[in-house]
């Protein structure tokens, strides 16, 4: 029984090492692979649209990763590669939209809305303050208050 | 009463914007290649791989470049429209057989009919990348100077042909 268990454990250990070996990075150049990973996180897969090029398993994403890898090996900079891609697929391929006149509304719209909201709030508050009129106490009110305050509490209930 | 007017106006504007947004197809990404020279390529012909086809050969002609593949389901849907267009002969249609197996592609054309004067085989999809192809079928209208004038993403329909492509062809051929 013990021996069987030992065999089983040995088998498990072997299985783990086999798995560990297949999980080794496949790339011959880890530096290029890292750069590819980083860059493709910034790029959109046009087939699935809400996936990055790094995550996508679509055929086109694979082709584009291959293309990027080859360009990196040829010594192209990230900027050159992005120019290459946007010339073909447009700015949509970038996950972070560029700041151009077309995207001003996208980038600055929320801040404009915030500013408008603050102005509206400020004006509302100012208007409300003007609505509140301070009416001074009449002599009669004052007397009544003093009377109430002067009455010892115990007496009234008694 | 008047204090309800402004929120109502804002609400209506928002609804209009959202309604327009819903009408857009998010899969139609505007191509940066419109009004740019069609990327040059030289590829083996599908039927005669020893011969090549290049976009440069087409200078002086207004033509359609249709990206298709035998594995592409929407291409099947588009096919009758292309056959009809080829029969009418309004504009020459050339095919870019995108990431396909040669035998499959030829069989597909034998089965369904061949609307293309010629198809070029882009086996690894490299030319497809140059043209910004992200989903077959896609169709490019290229003018006499080799400039891309129009791109249609997805299957061509009679409406797109009559409404957009054929009028443009007429215009460009003037």
Image (spheres, rainbow, N blue to C red):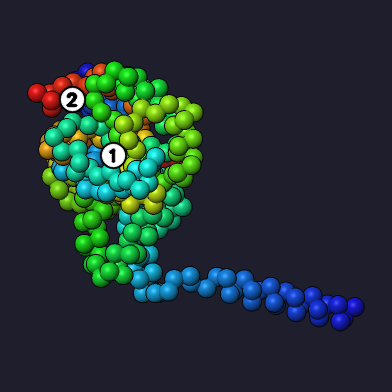
Residue B169, numbered circle: 2
Q: Which residue is at the front of the view, B51 or B68?
A: B51
Residue A128, numbered circle: none
Identify whether B69 is placed above or below B5.
Answer: below
Q: Mark 1 lies on which chain?
A: B
Identify the residue at horizontal 21%, vertical 56% (top origin).
A83
Identify the residue at horizontal 70%, vertical 77% (top origin).
A13
The image quarter containing residue B82 is: top left
Residue corresponding to mark 1: B29
Q: Is disc 2 surrounded by few (<14), some (14 to 19) or many (20+) residues within 10 Å?
A: many
Label 2 and label 1: CA atoms lie apart by 22 Å
Point out the frontmost of discs 2 and 1: 2
Q: Is disc 1 surrounded by few (<14), some (14 to 19) or many (20+) residues within 10 Å?
A: some
| N-terminal-most mark, 2 or 1 | 1
Extreme right residue here?
A: A1
Identify whether A57 is placed above or below B72.
Answer: below
Identify whether B58 is placed above or below A22.
Answer: above
Residue at disc 1, secondary structure: loop
Residue at disc 2, secondary structure: helix
Q: Residue B170: x percent and y percent?
A: 15, 21
Q: Residue A35: x percent and y percent?
A: 33, 68
To the question of a shared chain for discs 2 and 1, the answer is yes
Q: Which residue is at the front of the view, A23 or B155?
A: B155
Q: Decide if residue B155 is in sight here.
A: yes
Q: Decide if residue B17 is in sight here.
A: no
Identify the residue at horizontal 43%, vertical 26% (top origin).
B113
Left or right of A10 in this view: B69:
left
Identify the residue at horizontal 39%, vertical 40% (top origin).
B47
Q: Which chain carries label 2?
A: B
Identify whether B11 is placed above or below A92.
Answer: above
């Amino acid at each position: 029984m013990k021996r069987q268990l030992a065999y089983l454990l040995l088998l498990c250990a072997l299985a783990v090492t086999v798995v560990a070996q297949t999980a080794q990075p496949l790339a011959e150049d880890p530096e290029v692979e890292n750069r590819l990973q980083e860059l493709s996180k910034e790029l959109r897969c046009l087939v699935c649209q809400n996936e990055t090029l790094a995550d996508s398993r679509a055929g086109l994403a694979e082709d584009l990763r291959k293309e990027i890898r080859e360009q990196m090996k040829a010594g192209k900079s990230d900027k050159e590669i992005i120019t290459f891609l946007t010339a073909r697929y447009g700015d949509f391929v970038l996950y972070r939209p560029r700041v151009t006149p077309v995207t001003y509304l996208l980038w600055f719209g929320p801040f404009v809305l915030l500013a408008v909201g603050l102005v509206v709030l400020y004006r509302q508050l100012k208007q409300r303050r003007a609505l509140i009129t301070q009416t001074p106490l009449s002599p009669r009110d004052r007397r009544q208050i003093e009377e109430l305050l002067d009455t010892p509490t115990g007496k009234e209930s008694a | 009463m008047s204090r309800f007017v402004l929120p109502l106006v804002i609400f209506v504007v928002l609804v209009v914007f959202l309604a327009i947004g819903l009408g857009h197809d998010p899969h139609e990404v505007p191509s940066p290649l419109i009004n740019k020279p069609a990327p040059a390529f030289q590829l083996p012909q599908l039927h005669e791989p020893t011969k090549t086809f290049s976009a440069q050969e087409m200078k002086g002609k207004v033509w359609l470049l249709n990206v298709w593949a035998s594995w592409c389901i929407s291409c099947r849907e588009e096919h009758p429209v292309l056959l009809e267009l080829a029969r009418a002969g309004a504009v020459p249609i050339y095919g870019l057989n995108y990431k396909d197996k040669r035998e499959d592609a030829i069989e597909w054309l034998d089965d369904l009919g061949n609307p293309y004067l010629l198809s070029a085989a882009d086996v690894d999809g490299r030319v497809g990348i140059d043209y910004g192809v992200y989903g077959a079928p896609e169709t490019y209208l290229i003018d006499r100077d080799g400039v891309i004038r129009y791109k249609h993403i997805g299957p061509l329909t009679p409406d797109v042909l009559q409404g957009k492509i054929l009028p443009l062809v007429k215009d460009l051929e003037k």
